[in-house]
Amino acid sequence: MTVKSKKFTVKIIADECKGCNRCVKACPKNILALGNDLNRFGFPYVKLVKDECIGCGACYYSCPEPSALAVYEEV
Amino acid sequence: MEKLKFGKSSGFFDTFERRPGAIKKNMHYCPGCGHGILHKLLAEALEEMDIQDQTVLIAPVGCSVFTYYYFDCGGISVPHGRAPAVGSGIARANPDSFVISYQGDGDLGAIGFNNFIQAANRGENMTVLFVNNAIYGMTGGQMAPTTLPGQKTMTSPQGRDPLTEGYPLKVCETVAALDSPVYVERCALTSYKNIMQAKKALRKGLENLKNRKGFSLIEFLSGCPINLKMTTDEADHFIEERMMKYFPIGKFKDIADDRPAISKHLGIFEPAAVKRILYPNRQSSSKSKDFRNKSEIFTKERRIKCAGFGGQGILSLGMMIANMARLRNFNVTWLPSYGPEMRGGTANCSVVLSRDDVGSPIVDKDTNLLIAMNQPSMDKFLPELKKNGVLLYDSSSIEVPNCSEDKKVFGINAAEIAEDLGDHRVANSVILGALSFILRDYFLEGDDKADFDKTFEEAIIDCFANKKGIVDLNLKAFYKGKAAVETCF
Ligand SMILES: Cc1ncc(C[n+]2csc(CCOP(=O)(O)OP(=O)(O)O)c2C)c(N)n1
Ligand code: SF4
Ligand code: SF4
Ligand code: SF4
Ligand SMILES: [Mg+2]
């Protein structure tokens, strides 16, 4: 029998991210990182660098912007 | 398929239409600002607790001044530090509302501290969210009451020195010592763990609001990386290593379960009832209403300044003029301005007579009539006299003034006349007599001239109603003054 573990992912809206690094620091899996590219407002923005999200929400609650980043569950 | 697990709350507007400019999805805060973190917790709580429609979120002055851009709930903006006072009014006038006062450390701890602590002590039905970032954020990083010892800010460039500026204000500790507040907790918007604790505390504070338990305070140690000149990580480190030593996080008080729901007495709002309380049996006049003259005299506003030494009866002179006008159906204001001493100091009052509503009771320019009873008053107020204005002064103590041709100038030796009558204090009535003559020619039209003296007599009697003995003397002085000015022509 195989247990199908839940899968999660994070979506980032590049132009809403201010590159503050809070989510990067908060993520227990260390899978978020600031890139070198700048968004439309001149901020570096966060990217999901590994597909290992556990859906904990630490990034979401640490981020000061309402919708820069959201956590989804794959169903 | 994907299901949203953590995402934008509907406690926020979907698009921030109220925010000017092109950016409608982001907030105006600097990168990494703690206000944003708390906003998200609050929006989520408003949504999940289903209290958006009843909530009145009071925006302070400070970086969070624009909460109404973002939150889909009731809101109001208030002057700096006044959120708890306005909130008290809202909570009492509309007991169904949930009042949240969102305040910074400058707003709450400095300019607004008395409003805040009194509301806490009254146990108002409100929850205060206190964002302590140890600095004035909005204005560019000045020292706040909560700035740490040694912390450098724009206004403490050597670092806060407790010997000079005192120690940081411990707000939670102070409020917890009061009997009325039911819940006090300090949190930190730093790590995920601390943010989750803040989320819990916020819920508790809003539950108390929902259950009408009175006053709750939650303090949030919050990062202002920009003004601390730090990265976000460094700012969090500053909070956890330095601020939390001085401002320990944790629960200081939680007695909500032991307290019954509060319902404050409803205020009295019905206009007639308010009037009865504020102005109990105000007597208008001893004359019948028919006495009042209905003619449309001086349609323009008349702005009068009376000035002299304290003790010269300046204020009652103004009051007599005001009474005279009131008896003739004008709208009148009388605004005294006292010197620091009862006698010997200067006194003046502004009187405005109008057929319409009086806009401002202050006469500090465009004066139509200046009554000067000493030299300093003459020197001070003559420049405010309007073109074609009327000047009446006591020539027994004041030099002949040097004013432009357009002015109508009357000097009368009021003090000497009063001395002759045996009481220097009636100089004001002498002046009033002179004024009755002057006003007639310059301020009055038509029928009003006829019963004018009567009105002044009435005004004098009215003014000295509780000092009957001196009414006659003042009336005598009035007619002396009138006669004196008549002979000038
Ligand atoms: C009556 C008045 N005085 C002073 C100011 C200037 N002022 C604006 S915000 C502020 C301090 C805000 O600091 P704080 O309450 O800590 O809020 P923050 O921006 O740090 O969140 C001051 C002094 C003002 N707007 N109104
Ligand atoms: S939900 Fe948790 S694991 Fe996933 S990216 Fe955010 S912080 Fe990392
Ligand atoms: S916390 Fe938000 S704003 Fe900051 S870097 Fe992450 S996504 Fe961007
Ligand atoms: S100045 Fe400080 S408190 Fe104000 S928005 Fe920027 S980081 Fe936030
Ligand atoms: Mg502040």
Image (cartoon, coloured by chain):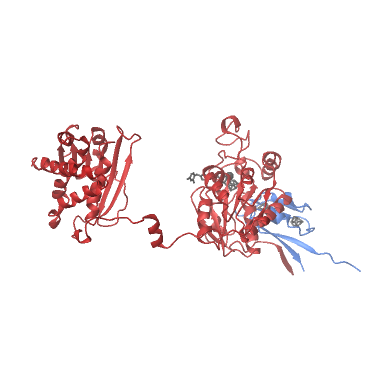
Chain colours: A blue, B red
Using the image, determine if residue B331 lies above or below residue B240. Answer: below
Q: What residue lies at 62% left-to-right and 61% top-to-bottom?
A: B210
Left-right relation of B215 to B379? right
Residue closer to the observer: B75 or B264: B264
Q: What residue lies at 72% left-to-right and 51% top-to-bottom?
A: B192
Residue closer to the observer: B68 or B15: B68
Split into quadrants, the picture shows ligand 5 in the one at: top right
Outermost right residue:
A1
Q: Quadrant of the N terminus of chain B?
A: bottom right
Q: Is residue B407 visible?
A: no
- At which x and y percent is residue B254? 68, 51
Using the image, determine if residue B248 lies above or below residue A32. Answer: above
Q: What residue lies at 77% left-to-right and 54% top-to-bottom?
A: A31
Left-right relation of B286 to A35? left
Q: Quadrant of the C terminus of chain B?
A: top left
User: Number of marks in the image?
Assistant: 0
- At which x and y percent is residue B309? 27, 35
Residue closer to the observer: B325 or B206: B325
Q: Is residue B95 visible?
A: yes
- At which x and y percent is residue B176? 64, 46
Image quadrant assignment for residue B110: top right
- At which x and y percent is residue B19? 53, 57
